[in-house]
Image (cartoon, grey):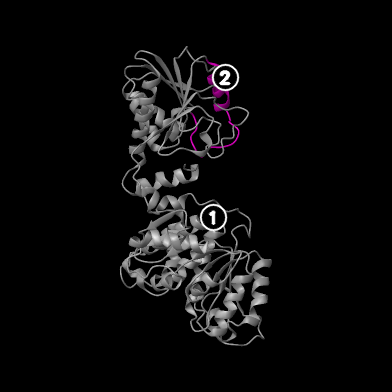
Amino acid sequence: MISSRRMAAVDRNAAALGVPLRVLMESSGNAVARRVQELTDPGDAVALVAGRGNNGGDALAASRFLDDRDSTVHLLGRPESITTDIARANWDALQASECDTRVVADSRAFSFERPDLIVDAMLGTGITGTLREPEATVARAMNDAAAPILAVDVPSGVDADTGAAEAVAVDAEHVVTFHEQKPGLAGHGDVVVADIGIPAAAETLVGPGDVAVLPETGGQKGDSGRVFVIGGGPYTGAPALAAGAALSSGADLAFLACPESVFDPIAGYSEDLIVQPYGGEDSGGSHLQPCHVPKLLDTAHRHDDIVVLGPGLGRHEETHEAARQFLAGFEGCGVVDADALPLVPDVETDATLVLTPNRSELAELGGPETEELVAQTDEIGRLAAELGHVVLAKGEVDVISDGAETRRCRAGTPGMTVGGTGDTLAGITAALLGRAEPFDAACAATAVNGRAAELLDRGTGLRATELQKTIPTALRGEGNE
């Protein structure tokens, strides 16, 4: 089973792997044509109803493989309103070859001429809600016709994820869907799943599709969330990098709690960060202590913050005890990085966490001791299942697992071995946790972090602070095509 959102990501990832959407459309069209030929006889009349998007493009491509059928293509809308280049190219090919094509400019006058089969290619997966015009009127005409209906990917008006159908939806006897079964198709006709040549790596390798399908955030202040970084002590740059990366990744606010002793240098890194000493200005101390935990928990819970715990924290005995207490009491969502990671296996917590270990920290968590993460993918998945948290293991190739599913990310450059890129990744992950499920956020964060480095085109000599300049471009997916 594959959801509509995941299918959109896989399509985009396939293109990044060298299988462009135009090739996939050609394969989809061929699959539709084969199914039409199975359901009809040579010479039968076939009416293909094409929308103006890529679902319609599949039908346009299919018609070129139906020379032995009396096929007619009905385009819903004017040709200039076709929304994608590849669908438009298929329409132009039909015009050049003088195929029987008809433009439906007014759906009120739409009717069929006794077809033996109707092909519904108006709307595909990912399109939900009440059918608008002209699709609603044409859907009624399809249902009222005597001919059986073959839906392309999903019957128009049916939610591919839930199976819910609006008041007006195409009642298809047959469905040809692509790549994998969609969860909402059960009970909506005889379903055939067609292999259209999407490589397996499009699902297992994180790519631009994983970023492109991230849910949109609202347009109001606060909709994109607050990130609350708890770190600093022996090191000052790490928490500042995490907080800055969170802002570059779309978080509305980044708060940073640190020891009083390093407040001034951390506060001086950027005017964009809101920096506060642990427990308040009169708390004193050079490291996180158990007495600071109640106020930190109150802040995190009161503001529904996404927490980043660990960057630059150090391993003082009191700091470890305080981090344990924070994790035990925290019930929100967050990222655990660096010095806080070894504590996770021994703490019972109701928090939803993404753990971001490097190779040595992975071993401290109870994972494999390895220089080659990809060879230990199964063991990393086992660790994620055992801990009950998402594990994002950082390396030349990142490995991300929630225990049920595991993916790899190859994005990045050799210059990312420089210190601070892991702190940056923690901040990106935290920001994306404000808009996506933990596993999806972690996968997308690795792609954004790596792509941000690629956009800098530094090779070696990269500095982690520079990534904050290109993170927004990487999030928008620019330069991936």
What residue is at 60 percent from the left and 87 percent from the top?
285
Would you call the spot at circle 2 few (<14 residues within 10 Å), some (14-19), or many (20 or more)? Answer: few
Q: Earlier in the sequence, mark 2 or mark 1?
A: 2
Label 2 sits on what residue type? Arg
478 drawn magenta = no
Give the quadrant of residue 459: bottom left
Give the quadrant of residue 7: top left
Which residue corresponds to mark 1?
437
| Residue 471 shows in this picture | yes
Start-end of magenta stretch: 122-145
Q: Vertically, is 311 above or below 34? A: below
What residue is at 66 percent from the left and 81 percent from the top?
280
Which residue corresponds to mark 2?
108
The secondary element bearing badge 1 is classed as loop
Residue 313 picture location, percent across and down: 52, 79
| Residue 248 shows in this picture | no
Residue 20 picture location, percent across and down: 34, 42
Label 1 sits on what residue type? Glu
The secondary element bearing badge 2 is classed as helix
Residues at marks 2 and 1, CA–CA distance in whole angstroms: 43 Å
